Image: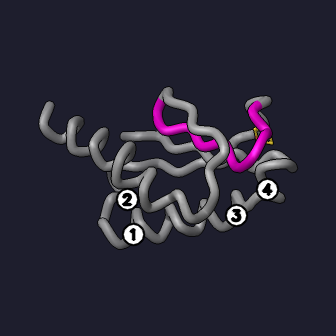
Amino acid sequence: MLIIQVCVGSSCFLRGSKIIIAEIEKLIAELQLEDKVLLKGCFCHDKCTGGVTVMVGEKLFTGIAPKDIEELFGQEILPIIKGAAECL
Ligand code: FES
């Protein structure tokens, strides 16, 4: 199970973490990944500049905007899920 954490600290919240969570939820549902991805909120990572902080597994992404989510999903999240599936 891949854990994705979206910061809901005050700075990230003001920069769109609520929209980002909704976008990720939508992609998880569209791609039927509910049993492979766990989406959680988290608090400040002290990386508050320029956008929302998103943690994918152990990897931290900063400065994420809602428009970046599809790219992040395609380039970072799906390869991890596919890689994990190939190991089974
Ligand atoms: S509020 Fe999100 S990293 Fe600080």
Q: Quadrant of residue 54?
A: top right
| Left or right of 13 on screen, residue 79 | left
> Residue 74, percent across and down?
34, 54
> Residue 45, percent across and down?
74, 31
Kindly report the distance in space between the C-alpha atoms of the residues bearing marks 3 and 2.
19 Å
> Nearer the N terminus, badge 3 or badge 1?
3
Q: Mark 3 and 1 residues: CB-CB less than 8 Å, in contact?
A: no
Q: Secondary structure beneath disc 2? A: loop
Residue at the spot 47% in from the left edge and 40% down from the top edge: 3
> Residue 31, percent across and down?
30, 66
Q: Mark 4 and 3 residues: CB-CB less than 8 Å, in contact?
A: yes
Q: Is mark 4 within 8 Å of ligand 1?
A: yes
Kindly report the distance in space between the C-alpha atoms of the residues bearing marks 2 and 1.
7 Å
Q: Which quarter shows the C terminus?
A: top left
- The residue where tag 4 is placed is 13
| Left or right of 19 on screen, residue 25 | left
> Nearer the N terminus, badge 4 or badge 3?
4
